[in-house]
Image (cartoon, grey):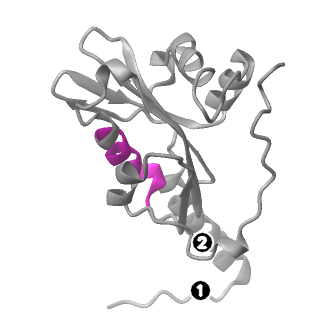
Amino acid sequence: MPFLRVTSRSLWLSLRFKIVDMQFAQHANADAVVELQRSEFLISTDPARLDLNMIHGFLTNCYWAKGIPRGVVARSIEHSLCFGVYDDAGAQVGFARVISDYATFAYIADVFVLESHRGRGLGKELMGCIKQHPSLQGLRRWNLSTKDAHGLYSPYGFAPLTWPERYMEIFRPNMYESD
């Protein structure tokens, strides 16, 4: 097998950065749309498909984001890798978003399926798509927070914190609620 020997430091640095750039390019394609058809439902990362009114309508009434302003939801979507679930008519019936550096860490947030579409395995399909997304492979740490969906997340490797004493947070539970 041939061995590549580079004697010039500038050539070595140039070659090294090209290799790093190629490796980065393999993982930096989070903007590429990924879609998965499951029977009459489609899971897609296409931001143009997202129904901001539906997403905001759900989040503003849920326990973890009660009262969240529409503008905050829009900004959170803009800066996340979002997954939408759509029925065969194209209506959005589920959502999740991932906040990540695409290298070491991902945080899964705002996962939901509308009540009218629960019990069909859509949450499981959504989690499967998230965990299999090409830009989210090889991450060292995944994180999420849930009050009542431990059974949904545990089959995907999620467990209680190994070292909860190492985690810190700034928590403002009623941030968006008004009196």
Residue 136 part of the magenta-drawn span: yes
Q: Is mark 2 on a helix, strand or loop?
A: helix
Query: Split into 4 quadrants, where in the image is the C terminus?
Result: top right
| Residue ID for mark 1 | 6
Where in the figure is residue 68, as x and y percent of width and height?
A: 71, 23
Left or right: 103, with 157 as reference point: right
Q: In this view, does 61 lie above or below 154?
A: above
Q: Is residue 8 above or below residue 40?
A: below
Residue 62 tag number: none
Question: What's the residue type where badge 2 is placed?
Answer: Leu
Residue stretch in magenta? 125-137
| Residue drawn at point x = 54 percent, y = 89 percent | 5
* Residue 83 seen by the camera: no
Question: What's the residue type where badge 1 is placed?
Answer: Val
Where in the figure is residue 131, as x and y percent of width and height?
A: 39, 52
First in sequence: mark 2 vs mark 1: 1
Residue 71 part of the magenta-drawn span: no
Where in the figure is residue 58, as x and y percent of width and height?
A: 53, 20
Given residues 165 and 35, the one toward you in this image is: 165
Where in the figure is residue 6, as x and y percent of width and height?
A: 59, 86
Determine which quarter of the picture holds residue 92: top left
Given residues 90 and 152, the one toward you in this image is: 152
Pointer 2 and pointer 1: residues touching (CB < 8 Å)? yes
Query: Split into 4 quadrants, where in the image is the N terminus?
Result: bottom left
Left or right: 73, with 149 as reference point: right
Given residues 101 and 124, the one toward you in this image is: 124
Determine which quarter of the picture holds residue 8: bottom right
Instruction: Count neighbours of disc 2 (C-alpha within 10 A) and say few if under 14, some if 14 to 19, many if 20 or more.
Output: few
Compute the Cα span from label 2 to label 1: 9 Å
| Residue ID for mark 2 | 15
